[in-house]
Amino acid sequence: MCICINCQYVDRCMTYHAVEHQHQQSHLTDAPDFDPQEPTINVNIRSRDEVIEMEWDVVGCQSFLQEVGRWARLRPGEPLPT
Ligand code: SF4
């Protein structure tokens, strides 16, 4: 699970914007203006039948600023991104 969902910058962050793109999720913002310091992205590659799936998760970041439940507050009622 991506640490970004509990980060205060999630709706401004350029890296999270790229992760949303990789997951084909709708964006929290179309114009991210925050460039995080040293995010570490874990990429899992799985093949299921003929399909290859890639899952991108930010697992570390110097700019992480905890705000538990920020993503969920911005998208009430939606399932958390995996
Ligand atoms: S943890 Fe880092 S990469 Fe993720 S939203 Fe926060 S600042 Fe951006």
Image (cartoon, helix red, strand yellow):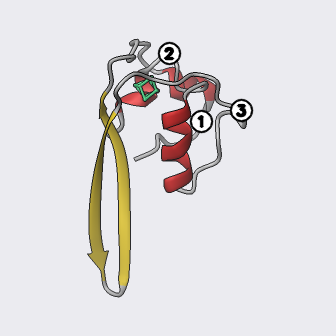
- Front position in the image: 25 or 30: 30
Residue type at the position of mark 1: Gly
Q: Is mark 2 within 8 Å of ligand 1?
A: yes
Q: Indicate whether 36 appears above or below 18.
A: above
Q: Residues within 10 Å of mark 2 (few under 14, many from 20)?
A: some
Residue type at the position of mark 3: Ala
Mark 1 or mark 3: name the one nearer the start of the chain.
3
Q: Compute the Cα span from label 1 to label 3.
A: 24 Å
Q: Which residue is mark 1?
A: 77
Residue at image x 37%, y 68%?
53
Residue type at the position of mark 2: Gln
Mark 2 or mark 1: name the one nearer the start of the chain.
2
Residue at image x 33%, y 24%?
61
- Front position in the image: 6 or 73: 6
Q: Which residue is mark 2?
A: 8
- Front position in the image: 74 or 56: 56
Element type where label 3 sits in the image:
loop
Q: Quadrant of residue 37?
A: top left
Query: Residue 44 location, x and y as percent?
Result: 27, 57
Residue at image x 28%, y 76%?
47
Query: Residue 28 location, x and y as percent?
Result: 65, 34
Q: Tell me the mark number nearer the camera, choosing from 1 and 3.
A: 3
Mark 2 or mark 3: name the one nearer the start of the chain.
2
Q: Tell me the mark number nearer the camera, choosing from 2 and 3.
A: 3
Quadrant in which ligand 1 is drawn? top left
Q: Tell me the mark number nearer the camera, choosing from 2 and 1.
A: 2
Marks 3 and 2: in contact by CB < 8 Å? no
Element type where label 1 sits in the image:
loop
Query: Which image quarter is the N terminus in?
Result: top left
Q: Which residue is mark 3?
A: 31
Residue at image x 59%, y 36%?
77
